[in-house]
Image (spheres, rainbow, N blue to C red):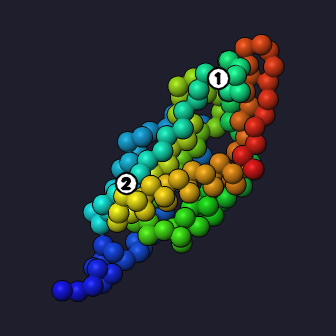
Amino acid sequence: MAPMNDHPGEQAAQEPIKLLAIRETALSLDEVFRAVGDDASGGTALFVGTVRNHDGGADVDALGYSSHPSAEAEMRRVAEKVVAEYPVRALAAVHRVGDLRVGDLAVVVAVSCPHRGEAFEACRKLIDDLKHEVPIWKHQTFSDGTEEWVGAC
């Protein structure tokens, strides 16, 4: 019997980064999930960030995201780091910009790996690094008339 790492499914995918985008249109869970489909993966982890109706104890009335022109390139850099650190078979990440409403999808990321633990870890690393390193900013308007900018990096 051949060692597990000799099986094609245990080897790195040729191009694991399947989908990276910053969009002004509504995001699709189905699109992201389909993008990371891989027959050699036993685990797929998906994270969905939605607009909530509060932040820091205040009611949120409006929210908008904007990004720097380098944001997609930075998103790719973050994705490449995750691929280098984990046995990623497929990876996808999309982030919304523009005006959003409570309940709208703001970000969707997904990672497929040979095993579930790796998929969970890689997905968490992907969303955490995306939020900390990609130049996307959130502008919140609160019900009391105050507002704030929240920077991703």
- Of residues 82 and 69, the one drawn nearer to the viewer in this rendering: 82
Amino acid marked by disc 1: His
Viewer-side residue, 6 vs 92: 6
Quarter of the view holding residue 7:
bottom left
Mark 1 vs 2, N-terminal side: 2
* Residue 72 falls left or right of residue 113: right
Task: Answer with the quarter of the image where residue 113 lies.
Answer: bottom left
118 w.r.t. 64: above or below? below
Badge 1 is on which residue? 54
Q: Is residue 19 above or below residue 138?
A: below
For label 1, the SS is strand
Q: Which residue is mark 2?
A: 44
| Residue 141 x/y as whole percent | 74, 22
Instruction: Report the residue at 78% width, 34% height from top.
Output: 149
Marker disc for residue 7: none
User: What residue do we see at 48% from left, 68% from top?
Assistant: 86
Element type at marker 2? Answer: strand
Q: Would residue 67 be visible to someone looking at this image?
A: no
* Residue at (71, 36) in percent of width and height: 138
Q: Percent position (x, y) of residue 45?
A: 41, 51
> What residue type is disc 2 on?
Thr
Residue at the image position 45 percent from the left and 51 percent from the top:
110
Q: Residues within 10 Å of mark 1 (few under 14, many from 20)?
A: some
